[in-house]
Every structure is written in C-alpha cells, then in structure tokens.
Amino acid sequence: MTFGPQPPGPPSAAGRPPVTASTKRLIVTGVVVAGLIVAAVIGHAIASGSSIAVGDCVRTSPSVTSGWDIKKVDCNQQFGIGDSVYKVDTVLDGSNQSCTGELAGSETTFNDDPANKTYCLLPWLGPNE
C-alpha cells in the first residue's frame, strides 16, 4: 500500500556510456603524456637559451620536442668526431633573425624559439683553434 507521491528514484545512467578501466587508463595516459611534453618544453627554455652568450661553446643535437636543441658546453672538453660543436659569434634578440655579418657565409644560424634568440655559430675545432 502506498500513501501519497513517492520520492524520485536514483538518476538514470541510461544516456551515458559506462566508464570502463580502459577508458580511465586512456585518460590517465593522456594526462601523463601532456605533462611530459609541458615539462620538456619548460626544461628546454630554462636550461638552454638565456645563459648562452658570445664566446661560449655550444653543442647542437636533434630533439624530439623541438626539432633541434642547443646546449652550452665547456670549450676545453674533448668532443667526439660526430659532435656538432660551435663557438657563439653573435646573439640576436628574436628567434626569426638571420646571421648577416661579414662571416655570414661560414656561420650556422640557430633559431631558438623558447629563448626567443638567434645564435650565429662558427665551427669549433677545439681549444687550440
């Protein structure tokens, strides 16, 4: 026997697909991958650009996140045969500049977007150069 109106029942989940373990795993994986990408970009911006100055030695290498990476290195260390090591000749503000000085034909231009700098680089042959 019922007396008066009955309270509404629990909301129906008929309109939503069920959340499965694989859906949760996919969401967690996406969040982790996005976090790693953000950390890599921030790490590159902190570690590379702002500390590089004229006269420094740098090494360039391929990078998954940015195409190419630039890192300041000690000019007196020994480098391998395949290492791309350069001496910084000029630092320009803005990552879309070109090296146009009198050595422009022998310089390598490295545009560093995270640091918003352009580096004009000369080949570094070693400390006895």
Image: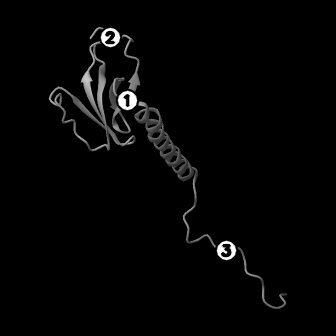
Cα distance, mark 2 to mark 3?
Answer: 75 Å
Residue 81 is situated, as x and y percent measured from the top left of the image, at 28, 13
Q: Which mark is residue 35?
A: none
Relative depth, front residue between 19 and 55: 55
Q: Which residue is mark 3?
A: 11
Which label sits in the foreground, 3 or 1? 1
Q: Earlier in the sequence, mark 3 or mark 1?
A: 3
Q: Earlier in the sequence, mark 1 or mark 2?
A: 1
The residue positioned farthest toward the front in the image shown: 102
The image shows residue 57, relative to residue 23, as above or below, that is: above
Q: Which residue is mark 1?
A: 53
User: In this image, 78 relative to 18: left or right?
Assistant: left
The residue positioned farthest toward the bottom in the image shown: 4
The image shows residue 109, relative to residue 58, as above or below, that is: below
Picture quarter with the N terminus: bottom right
The image shows residue 100, relative to residue 88, as above or below, that is: below
Residue 11 is situated, as x and y percent measured from the top left of the image, at 67, 74
